[in-house]
Amino acid sequence: MKYRNFLKSRLSDDIPDNLLLPSGFHLVGHVALVHLDFELMKYAHRIGNTTLEYDSRVKSVVVKTGPTKGRTRQPSYSLVAGDSNTVTTHIESGVKFKLDPLRLTFSGGNKGERIRVSHLTKHGENVVDMFSCVGQFTLHIAKAANVEVTAIEINPEAFEFLVENINLNELNDRVTAVLGDCRKVHPRGVANRVIMGYLHDTISYLPTAIETLVDEGGVIHMHLSIPESEVKRIIKRINQICRGYGFQSTTEVFNVKKYSPGIEHFVFDILVK
Ligand SMILES: C[S@@+](CC[C@H](N)C(=O)[O-])C[C@H]1O[C@@H](n2cnc3c(N)ncnc32)[C@H](O)[C@@H]1O
């Protein structure tokens, strides 16, 4: 039975018919992340307990209580049912990610992009992941190809899980984790491919990505959440910045997912020569 119908069948006596129950949840390991409309928040515990009954994989249910905040993208969730230990191991296409989704973001909507980039990466490449978090891109890439990856993360909490995940996936010989601000700690002149998996004013970090590439250039995957109408302006700006470093650039743009009303998550694949 579909999740919404299951909730309806169990909760119709308590929750008024005019309130729209959620159609699904995002599952990270054993933790179900549920988004509820404001009017449903007072029923969050009932919905949480019913979610535990709905899917035996779910051991903890958390609901979104506010926006994702700050440079480290700290999510706002609150536990409403089940196990209070929300540290979990999420497995995606054979890659293990240990994290606490109550404290760190892990977007299910980016899965296709993680797989796409891991397939683009060729054996022998040197890759720098500038915003690696717990290794979302790094681990897929290092698992798919015999590459050298430098994974940079500024948040010590995410960094701790990143180091643990490198061990968990037995990728120590391919991945080096670096704690710090990528603008300060990035390697220079080494990379064939740079991943910029950060959505907010990412273009201000493009000079750092260019400095990270080898002299012949390479590929930069720059993520950004913007209205579609902004795409052309961003491509112009990319060309300008690359020219400033003596490079030519060709950019392809892909839509990763809807981000919020009127805003899309795009990835700009920038071929720098
Ligand atoms: C939203 S997460 C995205 C993780 C992953 N790249 C992805 O796309 O799924 C962005 C990460 O970048 C980190 N971050 C933000 N600014 C940074 C900086 N200047 N240097 C290194 N890491 C940074 C944050 O702490 C956070 O873990």
Image: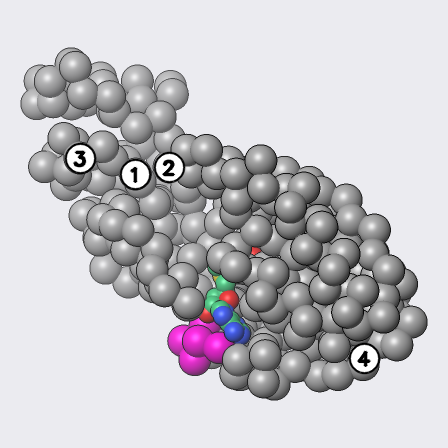
Q: Give the Cα separation between the discs numbered 3 and 4.
A: 49 Å
Q: Which mark is residue 35?
A: 1
Label 2 or label 4, whichever comes before in sequence order: 2
Q: Amino acid at mark 1?
A: His
**Quadrant placement of the C terminus:** bottom right
Q: Amino acid at mark 2?
A: Phe
Q: Position of residue 269 (x, y in %)?
A: 75, 51
Above or below — where is 62 with respect to 196? above
Q: Give the Cα separation between the discs numbered 2 and 4.
A: 40 Å
Question: Position of 35 compared to 129: left or right?
Answer: left
Q: Which mark is residue 25?
A: 2
Disc 1 or disc 3, which is closer to the eye?
Answer: 3
Q: Which residues are drawn in magenta?
A: 154-158
Label 1 or label 2, whichever comes before in sequence order: 2
Disc 4 or disc 1, which is closer to the eye?
Answer: 4
Foreground of the two, 64 or 190: 190
Q: Secondary structure at mark 2?
A: loop
Q: Residue beneath label 4, please? A: 190
Q: Which residue is depicted at the point 44% across and 52% down?
A: 29
Q: Which mark is residue 118?
A: none
Q: Residue beneath label 3, please? A: 38
Q: Are marks 1 and 2 in contact (CB under 8 Å)?
A: yes
Q: Position of residue 50 (x, y in %)?
A: 22, 33
Q: Is residue 256 magenta?
A: no
Q: Give the Cα separation between the discs numbered 1 and 3.
A: 9 Å
Q: Are marks 4 and 1 in contact (CB under 8 Å)?
A: no
Above or below — where is 228 with respect to 95? above
Above or below — where is 176 with respect to 3? below
